[in-house]
């Protein structure tokens, strides 16, 4: 029930799978996916969460492309789910919507 806005840099749609890719220009590239900054993990988790009902029956994958070293880092769905759970519990991110 929270409005989100974002832009997926590349979306590849196949008959059995959807891949959401975001390009990142960070100068320092994490060596492993468990070192991805929380904000980026939450961003990709939101994409993963929003794409699932749009493409039922297809596996949803997310990856980051680090432009500094031209590497592709697939993200673990469990890590993204955990990041989205943390985001939902974060009081600083609760919507500041006023009823009309």
Image (cartoon, rainbow, N blue to C red):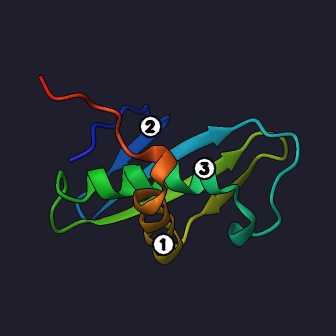
Report which residue position mark 1 lands on.
82
Whole-number angstrom distance, CA of label 2 to CA of label 3: 12 Å
Whole-number angstrom distance, CA of label 3 to CA of label 1: 13 Å
- Sequence-wise, the earlier of marks 2 and 3 is 2
- Sequence-wise, the earlier of marks 1 and 2 is 2
- In x, y percent, where is residue 57? 17, 68
How dense is the environment of label 1, judged by Cα within 10 Å: few (below 14), some, or many (20 and up)? some
**Which residue occupies the foreground of this view, 31 or 43?**
43
**Residue closest to the far bottom:** 78
Residue appearing at x 66%, y 47% in the figure: 65
- Residue 8, label in figure: 2
- Sequence-wise, the earlier of marks 3 and 1 is 3
Number of marks in picture: 3
- In x, y percent, where is residue 87? 47, 57
- In x, y percent, where is residue 63? 55, 56
Are the two marked residues, 1 and 2, in contact with CB atoms closer than 8 angstroms? Answer: no
Q: Is residue 13 above or below residue 30?
A: above
Are the two marked residues, 3 and 1, in contact with CB atoms closer than 8 angstroms? Answer: no
- In x, y percent, where is residue 3? 28, 37
Residue appearing at x 42%, y 33% in the figure: 6
Q: Secondary structure at mark 3?
A: helix
- Residue 40, label in figure: 3
Residue appearing at x 37%, y 32% in the figure: 5
């Amino acid at each position: 029930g929270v409005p989100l806005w974002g832009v997926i840099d590349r979306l590849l749609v196949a008959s059995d799978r959807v891949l959401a890719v975001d390009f990142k220009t960070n100068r320092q590239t994490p060596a492993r996916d468990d070192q991805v900054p929380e904000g980026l993990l939450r961003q990709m988790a939101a994409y993963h969460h929003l794409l699932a009902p749009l493409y039922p029956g297809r596996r949803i994958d997310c990856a980051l492309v680090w432009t500094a070293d031209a590497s592709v880092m697939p993200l673990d769905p469990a890590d993204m789910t955990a990041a989205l759970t943390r985001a939902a519990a974060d009081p600083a991110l609760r919507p500041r919507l006023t009823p009309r």
